[in-house]
Image (cartoon, rainbow, N blue to C red):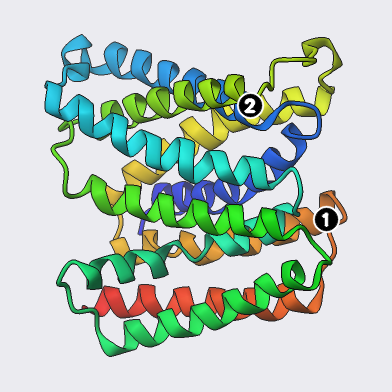
Amino acid sequence: MTGAVWAALAIVYVVWGSTYLGIRVVVETVPPFLSAGARFVTAGLLLAALVAWRQGPAALRVTRRQLGSVVLVGLLLILGGNGLVVLAETSIDSGLAALLIAAVPMWVVLLRAGTGDRPAPRTLGGVLLGMAGLAVLCSPGLSGSVRLSGVLLVLAATLLWSLGSFSSGRLPMPANPFAASAYEMVAGGIAALLVGVVRGEPRGFDPGAVSAGSWVALGYLVVFGSLLAFTAYAWLLQAAPLSLVATYAYVNPVVAVFLGWLILDEALTWPILLGGTVVVAAVGVIVSTERRG
């Protein structure tokens, strides 16, 4: 456990946890899918250029099947998983979105079970506990105190992100993970831009009316959220135990809720505190059980 490992882990904890706050600030003055598309197309092109510079253009070569795989995964992760979260954060708080996103490990377990895998009973118990926590988190939407549509959008995003993550390990992907990520971000980003156009987001959008905070937040998401944190995460997968790396799944929501409360004055209601605690505990159970397995 070197200092570099702890530094990279801190980046993943804090930066990925802070992206929910960044998204909330961006969508205050920038249409959701246009902002998501711009973020990931820019980040993907920058990452591709970095890979070509450090490892040579050959590192970006892919077969037709591999290209089809990265496009599909990019659509699931970037357009579906991230794009719906960005849309949802136009109507719900960043902290609530992050806590709902913590459900991803639960869906992955259920997808594994649906394809013949047999998760440990303790893992399934963690899933059931997490579902109870999600029910509490969804209660503000059912009571009308927050937009139910926003809650449902994030839940749909978690399913699509889980499906993309699950599929990426079963499809023919490029050998270079950084090249694969670059293609995924560009494909998903272009799709998000197209969805934004179909939704009519460019009509009436004036770049000159975008706030300084939104520009700064968008730049932060590109450089830190999509490049720095991803690079740190990919390096950690090779340099640290997976059980340690996986702890980001239940640290990120805590960071997001704290930052939302501290900077945006988001309310810490009892459903968020109770449901969030249950969901984070459930993810901890799943991660710790999978580590022992």
Q: Residue at x 33, y 88 (%)?
A: 122
| Residue 207 on image: x %, y % | 77, 12
| Residue 159 on image: x %, y % | 43, 57
Q: Mark 2 points at which residue?
A: 199
Tag 1 secondary structure: helix
Instruction: Tell which of 178 and 96 is nearer to you.
Output: 96
Instruction: Tell which of 57 and 137 is nearer to you.
Output: 137
Crowding at label 1, few (<14), some or many (≥20) Cα neighbours within 10 Å? few
Q: Residue at x 30, y 29 (%)?
A: 71
Q: Residue at x 48, y 45 (%)?
A: 81
Tag 2 secondary structure: loop
Q: Mark 1 points at which residue?
A: 262
Looking at the picture, which amino acid does disc 2 mark? Arg
Q: Report the side of 261 relative to 57 (left or right).
A: right
Q: In which quarter of the image is residue 216?
A: top right
> Does the image show residue 256?
no
